[in-house]
Amino acid sequence: MGMKCKKCGETAVINMRQHRLALCKDHFLEWVPLQVQRAIEKFGMFSPDDRVLVAVSGGKDSLGLWDILLRLGYSVEGLYIHLGIPDGDYSGVSQKKVESFASERGAPFMVIKVAAEFGMSIPEVARSKRGRSTCGTCGLIKRHTMNQLACEGGYGAIATGHNVDDEAAVLFQNVLHWSTGYLARQAPVLPASHPKLARKVKPLIRLYEREMAAYALLRGIDYIYQECPYSKGATTLLYKELLNQLEERSPGAKQQFYLSFLQARQEGRLLPDQTRAIEMGECTRCGQPTTAPDLCAFCRLWEPAPIG
Amino acid sequence: MKIIYRDKVWELKGRTSVRDAIRKVGLHPEAVLALRDGELITDDVIIAGDDTIKLISVVSGG
């Protein structure tokens, strides 16, 4: 017999050392949406009147987020971007997970196929652009596509499944490189600071990756367990491992690292808040906001390489 | 007892907590969840004998 649920005394299924909180299945499944609701309210992410576009990959975090937002009664639609990753039909298998999740719940969603939309899959685009990483290209294409759909569809926000571990790992990376530009912008809410820029929100900002995996398992969500083949050896995985070592010695360290960063910046103790101060023009081709003078980074991707 | 993680299997002897078993096989207690008979268990649970523990990675890349 292990620990007991703090609320009812039944056998606990999870112990969250950073909260000194062990919970049984029922109480844990009640507790998780409350954390999400608190984050939505605290950061003013969106309201019950907003239509929210949830970016889903088929993984535990995004499907968990979709499930939670549906349970909380928000008006949400899924967006699956088929990246065309061939290894073991990674993208096809992920899409099936999304489809069965949606059909079980009668939840609306749309699928965008990168190869059909732009003529090349993500790995093909990355290969055609020497010097561009696959993950960087993928991120760029996904951001462009999500923003375009959210703006055209009149959604109040795009929600992504980033959790504390993801944000803490990125923060760690940004601090190691003293990337002040990124540090100024890394936030649970990115406002729509331009008429053609959709609001972006991260409602899982109070939850650890471990809790999201437990949530998916306990809710019986069939998610894609394998990692994207391109994430192998990603530096963020190393940062996550280091942060987990810290967490073990000092429960709550990951959360503290991230939340106190947000607090320090908000109080102006760190950097000026630039989340809404950036001047943006519009891309001369696609019309999406950009800080570049002519073509945005997405449109430059499709330009032929200069000769010589 | 048997510890299963992805395509790896370890046999451990004696009695141990799930947390110590995770460490013994070289994994990180923060990075996995433990299932026994398909049920999620906390890592203070003592395992022994013919227990089979399946470990699930919680870490996503990228």
Image (cartoon, coloured by chain):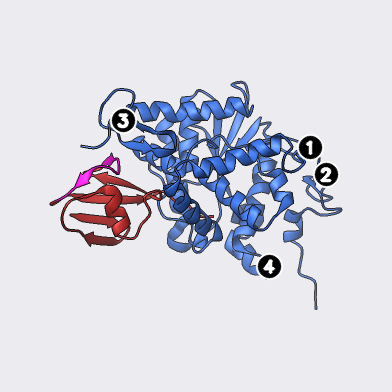
Chain colours: A blue, B red
Label 2 sits on a secondary structure element that is: loop
Q: Which residue is mark 1?
A: A194
For badge 1, the amino acid type reads: His
Residue A308 percent location from the top left of the image = 80, 78
Q: Nearer the viewer, residue A193 or A178?
A: A178
Q: Residue at x 59, y 21 (%)?
A: A48
Which stretch appears magenta? B39-48
Q: Earlier in the sequence, mark 4 or mark 1?
A: 4
Residue that sits furthest to the left in the current view:
B49
Say which label, 1 or 2, has the lower sequence index: 1
- The x, y position of residue A21, in whole percent, is 38, 32
Q: Is residue A46 visible?
A: yes
Q: Are marks 4 and 3 on the same chain?
A: yes
Q: Which residue is mark 2?
A: A280
Q: Disc 4 designates what residue? A: A129
Query: How much space separates mark 3 and mark 1, taking CA atoms?
Result: 45 Å
Q: Give the distance between the C-alpha atoms of the residues marked 1 and 2, in whole angstroms.
A: 7 Å
Give amino acid for label 4: Lys
Q: Is residue A201 left or right of A29 when viewed as pictured? A: right
Q: Secondary structure at mark 3?
A: loop
Foreground residue among A263 and A298: A263
Cα separation between marks 4 and 1: 29 Å
Between marks 3 and 2, how big is the CA–CA gap? 49 Å
Contact between labelled residues 1 and 4, with CB atoms less than 8 Å apart: no
Residues marked 1 and 2 touching at CB (< 8 Å):
yes
Give the mark, 3 or 1, whose residue is nearer the N terminus: 3
Tags 4 and 1 both on a single chain = yes
Nearer to us of marks 4 and 1 is 1
Disc 2 chain ID: A
Residue A81, horizontal then vertical, whole percent: 56, 48
